Image (tube, helix red, strand yellow):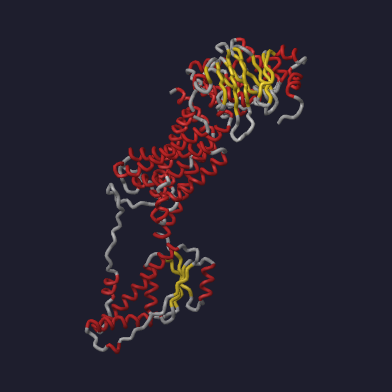
Amino acid sequence: MKNNAVTIQNLGYSYPKQSNPSLSDINLEIAAGERFGLFGPNGAGKTTLMNCLTGLLAYNQGKIFLSGNEVSRNNKSVRELFGFVPQDFSFYPELTPEENMDFFGAWYGLHKHEIKKRTTELLEVLGLADVHNKQVWQFSGGMKRRVNLAIAVMHEPQLLFLDEPTVGVDVQSRIAIINYLKELNAKGTTLVYTSHQLNEAEDLCEVIAMIDDGKIVAHDNLKNLLAHHKEEGLEGLFLNLTGKAFRD
Amino acid sequence: MYKLIATITKDIRILTRDKVGLTLMFVMPIILAIVIASIQNSTFKLVNENKIALLLCNKDTGDISKQFSIALEKAGIFQIKKVEAAETDEQIKNRMHAKDAFVAIIIPNSFSEKIAANAKGIADKALHNLGVQQDSQKIVAVKADPVTLYYHPVLQESFRRSIDGAIQGALQLIQSKQVLRSVYSSLNEKELPDSLENQIATNTAPINEIPVSRDGSRNIPNATQHNIPAWTIFAMFFIVISLGSSIVREKTSGSFIRLKTLPTSYLVALASKQLTYLTVTILQAVVIFAIGIWLFPVMGLPKLNIPSDILSLFLVTLICGWCAVSFAICIGVFAQTQEQSNGFGAVSIVLLAAIGGVLVPSFVMPASFRTIMQLSPLHWCLELYYGLFLEGGKLSDIWMNIIPLLAIIILIHVLIVVGLKKKNLI
């Protein structure tokens, strides 16, 4: 378990007043340094699982460990381990990227000089240096996605959860984000990624899991899964495992 | 500590970029204070300085009705417009509908004769009782015909009572004079000298009006002294519109999802909001007090007199502001949407202001409301400010009113913690 970035044991979660569980009997291990993708149709349980992993939802059954620390017990220390890029824009649009990073950096527990250093680096790498003093509400969708990512990685987390980090952005921004994520992974950050952009996912992820009806239906190295199911790409594999019927 | 400083910096940045919120917090209460103080000041002037137009139709030709007319003029609150004796009641009513005047008096044609006869009857009775006049058969009791008073329905009851009082006073004066004259002429067989009559009629004991103040001040409270503290409290509590929706906006925005995943408690965010908005409430008070001191006299309104105990004033402002901010945070924590926060926040403040005595003086409220009134934090805030501004009190005089306010603040904080726990925010 110590070499795993994420260990999930018999996880179950039911939303209040819902008879069917949203997650049931999930067992999963994500190795440290892995580029892991979690896929499934709408309503399959991806976001619920992501919310349990990040502590946004208090799960009812099973256990989750991040780098050996149980999520439900050591909240503060666990939260220091990871960064989270939610699907929604998670910043204050009235503030500039720099001001957002000043605030969120402090909440990560960083010192003032560390915040300054990381802000300068990240704004430069993600192509936001020229607009560091502009309020974020004035930004394009792609720029906002990059701000969302920059804030999540300020504290150089061991583990990064990404919930559709490139939804609604242009090709240039998408490439910039994916390249930066690869760079981070090369430096040792474990990536846990969900998306409906399967081409992008195929490029980024080494290991994937398919979730459907709250259960893991496949989990392996992408190449092995494609070979096993005799599919050429992730899209074919996705349809093979989850079917063609509407799911939402 | 750096987390708190960074959060306060963030809150100040967001607050200062919200122009509408700032307008609501500062400009709206200033306008409110100016408008309400001006209106109330005009009301005081209407009663005390301005004159109410009165139509006087004298159908009598005698001296007593003329004296009554003079007495009405001397009452000082009427601007008398005399109308022809031939005018009918309908014509007079039409004049009133046309807003020529709000009050009309019709003196009946035998008024002087009947008043004189009535006075003579009273004088004879008095003399008989004193044993001066022996023949009781000669005493004739005559009832005076009533004076008709028309008033416009827009006149509120308090105005009508003032007018009734003034007219009754004038009638009483001429009737008393008439009785006096009858008694004098029966005893002396000559007319009462004017000098003696005036001396007797005007010989009333003076009234010395002194406000009961704790610091010995004899300044009579004016509209400003009543209104500025009341509307300062109202403005402080109206911060719910800005602060309540700021919390809801944060809760429903993506930024809150991130905040919940960070290794810092949301209580830091609430502490920051408390401190930031507490500063705003103190600034509101400073601005409104400054307007009362410097702008009101320029506008022809009475000047605000600041209490001598400045430290108590600061402490009271701080506690009132803290209560207002805590209330707004509580609304923000429980509200699901900005509409809920704004709607419930605004309505609850108006209700709490009404039952707390901000809109209507607490002493005129029915007994049942006086118990409910004590549940309103605005009531205790107002009691504290009035203790300083109107009674000239010090901290030792008002501390008993601080205790219930602190109890309300603690209760609000308990509710905040329960709300945060229920929503899994702490």
- x, y percent for residue A246: 74, 30
Q: Is residue B51 above or below residue B129?
A: above
Q: Is residue B420 above or below residue B291?
A: above
- x, y percent for residue B340: 56, 41
Q: Nearer the viewer, residue A12 or B386?
A: A12
Side of B294 where A116 appears, left or right = right
Quarter holding residue A38: top right
Quarter holding residue B107: bottom left
Q: Which quadrant of the figure contains the N terminus of chain B?
A: top left
User: Is residue A168 at all visible to an observer of this figure?
Assistant: no
Q: Nearer the viewer, residue B7 or B329?
A: B329
Side of A27 where B247 appears, left or right = left
Extreme residue toward the left, this view: B131
Q: Is residue B413 above or below residue A98?
A: below
- x, y percent for residue A76: 49, 21
Image point (35%, 51%), residue name: B221
User: Is residue B380 at all visible to an observer of this figure?
Assistant: yes
- x, y percent for residue A113: 48, 16
Q: Is residue B139 above or below residue B398?
A: below
How many circles with numbers are drawn on the protein? 0
Image point (49%, 36%), residue name: B419
Side of A24 where B86 appears, left or right = left
Q: Nearer the viewer, residue A126 or B100?
A: A126
